[in-house]
Image: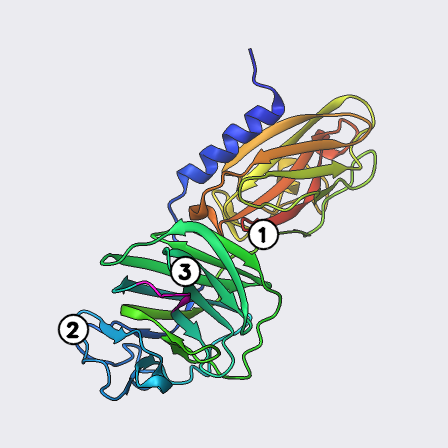
Amino acid sequence: MHAPPRLAASRIFLAVLAASATALVGQQIQAFYPLATDLLDATNTYGPISLLGSPPPAPPSNGVCANGVYFFGGGQDVRTPLLTSLDITDFEIDVEFNITALPTFQGPVIMGGDLWRWLGIYLQPNGTVGIKHNNSNLSWSTTTLTTGQWYSASLKYEGGVAALFLGGSLVHFVTTGPLSDGNNRNITTNDFSNGRAFNGCIRNLLVMNNTTLVATASPYGVGCPGSAGTPALAPTTSPQLGTVFQLGASSLPPGPGFALLAVGFSQTISALGPLPLSLQPLGLGAGCNLLVSVDATTGAATTGGTAGFSLNVPFNPAFLGFALYFQCASIDPPAPGGIAVSNAVAATIGL
């Protein structure tokens, strides 16, 4: 007994994701402050972190620690120089932190901008962690943290969405819209908008451009004609975590038939060679090209010249930024070689 097309496609999609352990590439490191024994940027791009206050925080020893008192109230601050190459529209800030004491009201772990407060990690007195953006907007997760434990956090921003990960797991995201930074692109342990400061230690502060957070899907390339015109493949939803990603094919033969969907990891290389790859030597018509690497396939019945493909996207943040490519081919006896081929769709899994 065969699985229904949607179930079969979902299984293939999961298998495709599970089969790939390829790390995301393309992120551009802007600065890295290990704060193990010194205050230096390991990339040698920017100057050292500043330890501010009277007295200032102690020199690094597997991290630097601040006392939780507001800088202008006689307290301390740990602050990077201005990171002028930071792309405020698409970036990631990673940091490890250890809470010495939770705030009495609410306060920062880190804050982007001492003057503009564009994005930061925030804590409530009970340890609930959240995101602050654009000076005064707070959004809270359902995750609570405790004192005396090192946490590994990633704060990512792209396309008007900010997301917080702890230990690689997504704990919260919020739609922020554009960030207002006033070119004040440093990172601090104080919130200078309300006089609050982090009471704890930080280390391994890493700042990168070009994170991948928002789901995208768009057609590219062209297909080749069949008896009902040139098949067209288009996304009808976005490939968001925890949803069903849907694609629709049109301009297929009008009678009952069958369409094949190829799923690939690449749009530039395949087992048969570089892409696009002409299929004309295989007997297909002029302009018929393979546009995706074929790492998995699934099929669907065609009705009324259309076909639909539904693919379950797991709610697993490990798949954020994962790129997949799709192309449809239909059985079409009047077409050269009996097959008509669509354009392709490039999809990036995201929020």
* Residue 14 versus residue 234 in the image, above or below: above
Label of residue 61 in the image: 2
Mark 2 or 1, which is nearer the eye?
A: 2
- Residue 33 shown left or right of residue 290 in the figure: left
Tell which of 260 and 9 is nearer to you.
9
Query: CB under 8 Å between callouts 1 and 3?
Result: no
Disc 2 crowd rating (10 Å Cα; few below 14, some 14-19, many 20+) is few
Total labels drawn: 3
Disc 1 crowd rating (10 Å Cα; few below 14, some 14-19, many 20+) is many
State which tag comes first along the sequence, 3 or 2. Answer: 2
Q: Of all residues shown, which one is farthest toward the top?
A: 1
Q: Secondary structure under badge 2? A: loop
Query: CB under 8 Å between callouts 2 and 1?
Result: no
Q: Can the viewer see residue 240?
A: yes
Q: Position of residue 183 (x, y in %)?
A: 52, 84
Residue at figure coordinates x 46%, y 80% from the top left: 185
Residue at figure coordinates x 55%, y 83% from the top left: 182
Label of residue 173 in the image: none
Tell which of 217 and 35 is nearer to you.
35
Q: Position of residue 215 (x, y in %)?
A: 58, 52
Label of residue 215 in the image: 1
Amino acid type at circle 3 is Gln
**Residue 260 among magenta residues:** no
Amino acid type at circle 2 is Ser
How far is the residue under mark 3 from the one under mark 2? 27 Å
State which tag comes first along the sequence, 1 or 3. Answer: 3
User: Magenta segment, which residues?
Assistant: 102-108
Task: Using the rendered view, name the quadrant where residue 176 is placed.
Answer: bottom right
Q: Which residue is mark 3?
A: 124
* Residue 81 versus residue 98 in the image, above or below: below
